[in-house]
Image (cartoon, rainbow, N blue to C red):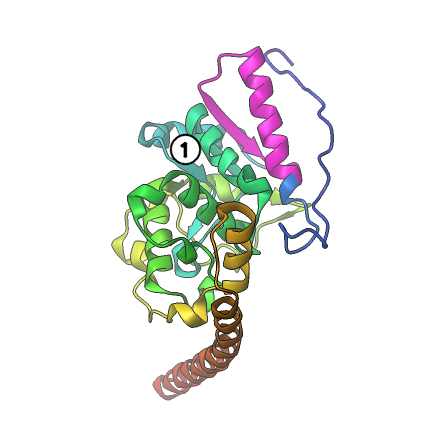
Amino acid sequence: MEGISVTSLPDPSAIMDDSPRAYKAHNRNRQFIGIRQGLDWLRMHSKAEYVVQMRTDQFVDLRELLDSFERQVRHQRICVPFLRPGIFLASDFYIAADFSSFEDFVNAQLSHDRYEFIVDVHRDMILKYAYASFRGVLGVPDWAYFPRAPHAGMHKKTKDIFSYMLQEIFTPLSETTLRSVVWRGSPLSEEYLKEVRTEENASHEETRRSKMDAISVPALLSINWKRYYEFCRLYNKKKLSFWKEVLLIALGNVGWNGWVLLWKALKTGKRKVLWLAKRQSN
């Protein structure tokens, strides 16, 4: 096809379970290393100003994607399929941005020898980009970038990171583009599309805030201290107090397990109240 170039690049493989950098062997490294190689190729063979990356396990309406991207490109943000502010994540089915911003974003994912701040790529890519490019703007402690499970509760400083990134740095493309996706042979289900922020509702204040103002969980409980201290040893070369580290990790693990039990009980109780209220209204 005219104007199309196809290039084959070496498979970077996955990081294995015994690596101190990763939680498990998976394909996220193939994704970001492959994108990095693609950017290098584009720099050498083109004068591209903008980049659109798509995963190979899907079909999507490219015309609609580009139309939506054209409406967003002036904001110089990282454009993604959708955001879910209530559980603090961004989708990665496809990503679009100007070349410079895209390069900064990908370099952040590969920084610190691909060390993962959190197990979920949809949150990790937000945290790593924030740490690499916006730490000075955010002004929060380094430990705030290492939450345990944001959907179950986190510290206010970590919440500030997600709030800033999901409002100012990432932006969603159109719902029409999202609904055109055929992922691994099937269209996205309505359940999957619930409570997502797309281009059409991105300016709604109630959508934007969502659960950002939920209860702040103390750092002792909500920060993955083991992960944070390991990061410090590997990359920051800080002198750490062994006993302080052991104590924080132990107390944090016990406290977090207790918090999760309480959180699940509160969720169950809320569902029962809503069910009773609905039953009475009928």
Name above or below for residue 52 compared with residue 20: above
Question: Is 51 inside the magenta-drawn segment?
Answer: yes
Question: Is 65 inside the magenta-drawn segment?
Answer: no
Name above or below for residue 245 compared with residue 142: below
**Quadrant of residue 174 within the rendered picture:** top left
Q: Which residue is mark 1?
A: 68
| Three-letter amino acid code at the position of disc 1 | Ser
- Nearest to the observer: residue 118 or residue 28: 118
- Nearest to the observer: residue 111 or residue 216: 111
Where does the C terminus fall, quadrant-wise?
A: bottom left
Q: Residues within 10 Å of mark 1 (few under 14, many from 20)?
A: some
**Quadrant of residue 42 within the rendered picture:** top right
Residue 235: x, y in percent?
Answer: 53, 46
Name above or below for residue 109 compared with residue 149: above
**Quadrant of residue 32 within the rendered picture:** top right
Point 51% across, 50% down: residue: 124
Relative side of 239 to 202, left or right: right
Residue 115: x, y in percent?
Answer: 57, 47
Residue 266: x, y in percent?
Answer: 42, 82
Relative side of 22 to 225, left or right: right
Residue 238: x, y in percent?
Answer: 47, 52
Residue 87 seen in this snapshot? yes
Magenta-tinted stretch? 30-59
